[in-house]
Amino acid sequence: MNFGIPKELPPFKETPELRVGLSPMGVKELVLYGAKVYIESKAGERAGFSDEHYKKAGGIIVYSKEEAYRRADIVLKVRRPQQEEYSFIKEGQIIMGFVHLLTAGKEFIQTIKEKKVTLVGYEIIQKDDGRLPIVIPMSEIAGKLSVQLAARLLESSHGGRGILLGGIPGIPPAEVVILGGGTLGCNSAKSFAGIGANVYVLDINRDKMEELACHTRGTRVTTIFASRYSIEKLVKFADVLIGAVLVRGKRTPILVTKEMVKTMRSGTVIIDFDIDQGGSIETAKISPSGKFIYTIDNVIHFCMPNATTLVARTATHAITSSIFKYLRMITQSGFEQTVRGNSDLNRGIYAEKGKIRKEFL
């Protein structure tokens, strides 16, 4: 089995992509199981992994993106291929990564069909109990990252309200509202509460709220049913609003309207982690240039579709550790046999030999 790891291209001009499809640790393990792994030179450099690291792991360095594709049976990506890569894709090839087919362009979809590509989306690989094993660690990272982002954007020098998230004795802390009580929302809530912010988590799933309440007992976290009324009420006094909603394989529903954003105070911060699936806040957009920090109605918006790239090394390790067991099975048994015997991976297929599954059309 031959794997190819091309250097990631930025999805937009002003949006960097610093992660890589597999760490040297992952490469070494695949090589031990008999695979050949071709890595485009400097593919991991921006995540702190040099060509020498990959060579020591048993990987084979190639010096063009085309060669990384052409030598591979399976291409390991972080994000779906960009337009410049379409011509390198081989007929019948298997491509794995965070695909988000819902937001893909027509040209990409046409390429998949014409070249009879099998497309595996990490974000829709799902266990029998409903958990998303590749999404979970990335959501944990994003949740913890949200505190770093919010703290910086709230600073006066960035046009924020100029407040400290945790406050000090005699001066109240920030009010943080989180839409969604899943893995991302839970980790975000714990992180904000850990530095003393007042946190409100909204969800429609009572089981999630009960679980979150157990994890955050004794902290400044309040769980609230996500009705239109409660969202409108909380948005008005939020210093930080976090979008943390996920609907597997579907567009994220809009929960906060333009009119609600207009009621927010000047210098408050919106971080929409749902933007790669459309966004849960109506004013959250990806500009044609990829500018991911902008202001609307005096509210600062952070809408980066690949936010975990800001901690590229941690994110790459997380991707590698969560996808590796599937890669090991593929190396040992072949892709088709693995998919037939593994329901997790089977659920992760967007397209099989060019045919897009009907639920994703």
Image (cartoon, grey):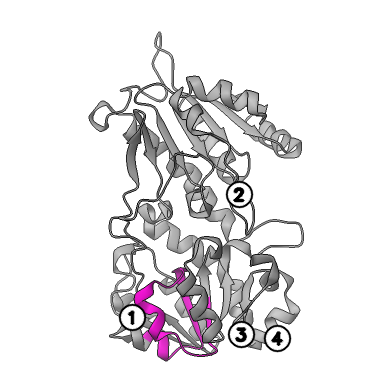
Magenta segment: does it hold 195? no
Please report whichever mark, 3 or 1, sits nearer to the chain's N-terminal start: 1
For label 3, count other residues whose C-alpha is less than 10 Å away and answer few (under 14), some (14-19) or many (20+): some
**Which labelled disc corresponds to residue 337?**
4
For label 2, count other residues whose C-alpha is less than 10 Å away and answer few (under 14), some (14-19) or many (20+): many
**Which labelled disc corresponds to residue 40?**
1
Residue depicted at 59% across the width and 39% down the height: 186
For disc 3, the marked residue is 353
Please report whichever mark, 1 or 4, sits nearer to the chain's N-terminal start: 1
Q: How far is mark 2 from mark 4, CA to CA?
A: 30 Å
Please report whichever mark, 2 or 4, sits nearer to the chain's N-terminal start: 2
Q: Amino acid at mark 4?
A: Gln
Residue depicted at 74% across the width and 71% down the height: 343
For disc 2, the marked residue is 246
Please report whichever mark, 2 or 1, sits nearer to the chain's N-terminal start: 1
Q: Nearer the viewer, residue 267 or 338?
A: 267
Q: Secondary structure at mark 4?
A: helix
Expressed as whole percent of the image width and height from the top left, the position of residue 259 reads 49, 28
Q: Nearer the viewer, mark 2 or mark 1?
A: 2
Q: Is residue 12 above or below residue 142?
A: below
